[in-house]
């Protein structure tokens, strides 16, 4: 059920009990802000919610001149007595991807099944109000001119613009003092860490940070590059098992293969790497052959002198042909189901009937180009620079240096922006959820678990011992629910008002696999909990097949609740939260 309310004012919205209210805004001939009311039936009961669809103007602070308009969809539920609902701001990656897939295939209250929208049992809305953000150049978001676009299409400009969107949105909605969660996927995860830091700098109450398929910005630790490379062997071993290239003595299930490889990496491989220069050629050759057996490659794929390999080498050698760079298991690109039903819903059910193409879903060529020349995609024109004014020569040199590393990903020019690590330092109670796919060539669950062991932990007042634990867990191919860290973000004071509702409709729980840090110590920044999701039951997939076995017509979250087996995934794209 839905009720459409166009051009709604603050007093009327307040009377409806919604947390989202704003005067109607018309930007560059686009529709006014629209607010609609809806109802969803979830396994734990029905919920009534409101949706606001609109665009927030990004202005030059010096002149007040509009530079761009950021489109958003904001979902809210009226809070119950004595509760304050947090607001989660979430966006996609790319760069250049809109939030529609995150919304209609994962975190929103409605998801696409067989081309139509149905109520989503895994929605984040049960735990938090959610604002889906389309950065400028994606979705219905646009710069005011071609000349204004570069202000949004660099790493540094993008972070500044998204931070400004949240600041302006909160002020316009009288929500400056609400607790916030910042969430980003893939490229958007690095953006999320930097935006969280900037918001904390400006005095906003950021309680949580969700980094999906990317751990960029977390605190570094000594010898991290070498340790991470060694632990990545366990991620390779799980993939080798999938392709029947792992000897049975090293494990016959992903969990066993990972545990065995992590133990060998920690006890044998890492110590050997630390003394590789002192090893004889015979010793290096023996280590090289054992490494090759443990990851399913021929020994000649591994460097004879360093006894190591790059991600690109593994990607090119594990399968009969080059796998898809976002999923070791796919030999061709994975294509998400069409999002047309979601875009149609924005225009029709949610009342934002824009005639612009929804970039990232609808082709730019479906719109009008006055010269007949259509603009290139945001990805192709993106400047991966963390400083303003980078020259073409500097960018080309950065590209060459990155290509020489053999890593999968994107070049970067300039120093790292403050991110999750610096956000830790500003907020000692910040909580982080890290979600990664077990078959993700762009990262790895074992890398993340090891990272968690080395992160600084909070010390109790007047106590020499640490009192918090870091948790390393590996993600599922489905929506990552806020309930997985909701209780960690809630205030710990017994007389504090709860941030999250005590009772929620629907959802499911997953067990925590704790990974204690090997050593104590405070360090810079403070960690209360870092969570990387693992299945709550063993991973028993049939490794000969190309598809996961799953009951037809049932979401992965629903099967988890029913006790069925769930499986790790690839690099988490938006559709992974509800389906694979």
Image (spheres, rainbow, N blue to C red):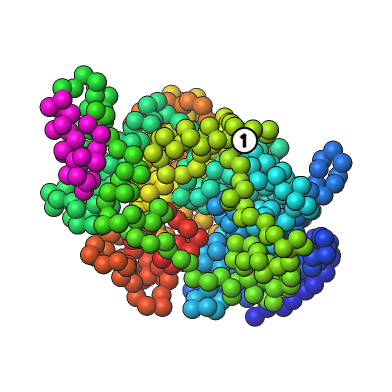
Quadrant of the snapshot with the N terminus: bottom right
Q: Residue at x 58, y 31 (%)?
A: 394
Name above or below for residue 113 compared with residue 580: below
Residue ID for mark 1: 392
Q: Residue at x 22, y 65 (%)?
A: 544
Looking at the picture, how far across and down is residue 499, in whole percent? Answer: 60, 52
Asked whether, in this view, residue 224 is left or right of residue 259, the answer is right
Looking at the picture, how far across and down is residue 490, in whole percent? Answer: 56, 48
Q: Quadrant of residue 72?
A: bottom right
Quadrant of the snapshot with the C terminus: bottom left
Q: Residue at x 79, y 53 (%)?
A: 144
Q: Nearer the viewer, residue 45 or 154?
A: 154
Q: Nearer the viewer, residue 372 or 214?
A: 372
Magenta segment boundaries in residue numbering: 281-304
Asked whether, in this view, residue 233 is left or right of residue 247, the answer is right
**Mark 1: secondary structure:** helix
Looking at the picture, how far across and down is residue 536, in whole percent? Answer: 34, 58
């Amino acid at each position: 059920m839905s009720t459409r309310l166009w051009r709604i004012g603050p007093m009327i919205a307040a009377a409806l009990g919604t947390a989202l209210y704003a005067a109607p805004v018309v930007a560059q001939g686009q529709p006014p802000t629209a607010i609609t009311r809806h109802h969803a039936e979830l396994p734990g009961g029905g919920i009534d919610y409101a949706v606001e669809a609109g665009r927030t103007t990004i202005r030059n602070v010096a002149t007040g001149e509009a530079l761009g308009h950021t489109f958003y969809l904001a979902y809210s539920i009226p809070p119950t007595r004595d509760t304050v609902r947090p607001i989660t701001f979430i966006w996609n990656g790319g760069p250049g991807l809109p939030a529609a897939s995150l919304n209609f295939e994962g975190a929103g209250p409605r998801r696409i099944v067989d081309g139509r929208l149905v109520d989503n049992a895994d929605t984040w809305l049960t735990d938090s109000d959610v604002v889906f953000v389309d950065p400028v150049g994606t979705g219905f978001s646009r710069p005011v001119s071609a000349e204004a676009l570069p202000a949004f299409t660099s790493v540094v400009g993008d972070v500044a613009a998204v931070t400004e969107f949240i600041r302006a949105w909160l002020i316009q909605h009288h929500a400056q003092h609400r607790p916030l969660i910042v969430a980003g996927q893939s490229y958007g995860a690095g953006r999320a860490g930097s935006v969280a830091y900037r918001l904390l700098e400006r005095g906003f109450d950021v309680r949580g940070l969700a980094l999906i398929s990317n751990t960029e910005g977390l605190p570094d630790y000594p010898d991290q590059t070498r340790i991470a490379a060694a632990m990545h062997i366990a991620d390779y071993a799980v993939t080798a098992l999938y392709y029947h290239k792992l000897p049975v003595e090293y494990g016959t299930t992903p969990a066993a293969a990972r545990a065995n490889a992590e133990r060998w990496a920690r006890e044998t491989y890492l110590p050997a790497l630390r003394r590789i220069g002192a090893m004889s050629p015979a010793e290096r050759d023996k280590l090289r052959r054992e490494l090759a057996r443990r990851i399913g490659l021929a020994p000649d794929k591994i460097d004879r002198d360093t006894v190591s390999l790059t991600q690109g080498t593994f990607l090119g050698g594990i399968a009969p042909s080059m796998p898809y760079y976002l999923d070791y298991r796919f030999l061709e690109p994975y294509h998400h189901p069409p999002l047309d039903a979601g875009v149609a819903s924005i225009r029709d059910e949610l009342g934002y009937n824009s005639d612009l193409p929804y970039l990232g879903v609808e082709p730019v060529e479906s719109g009008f180009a006055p010269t007949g020349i259509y603009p290139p995609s945001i990805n192709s024109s993106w400047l991966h620079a963390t400083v303003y004014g980078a020259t073409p020569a500097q960018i080309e040199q950065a590209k060459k240096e990155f290509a020489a590393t053999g890593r999968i990903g994107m070049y970067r020019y300039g120093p790292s922006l403050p991110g999750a690590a610096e956000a830790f330092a500003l907020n000692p109670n910040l909580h982080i959820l890290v979600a990664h796919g077990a078959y993700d060539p762009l990262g790895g669950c074992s890398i993340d678990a090891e990272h968690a062991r080395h992160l600084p932990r909070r010390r109790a007042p007047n106590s020499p011992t640490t009192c918090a634990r870091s948790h390393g867990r590996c993600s599922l191919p489905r929506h990552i629910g806020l309930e997985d860290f909701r209780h960690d973000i809630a205030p710990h004071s017994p007389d504090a008002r709860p941030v999250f509702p005590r009772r929620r409709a629907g959802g499911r729980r997953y067990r925590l696999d704790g990974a204690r840090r090997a050593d104590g110590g405070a360090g810079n920044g403070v960690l209360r909990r870092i969570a990387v999701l693992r299945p709550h039951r063993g991973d028993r997939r049939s490794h000969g097949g190309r598809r996961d076995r799953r009951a037809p017509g049932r979401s992965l979250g629903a099967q988890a609740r029913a006790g069925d087996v769930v499986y790790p995934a690839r690099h988490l794209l938006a559709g992974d939260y509800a389906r694979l």
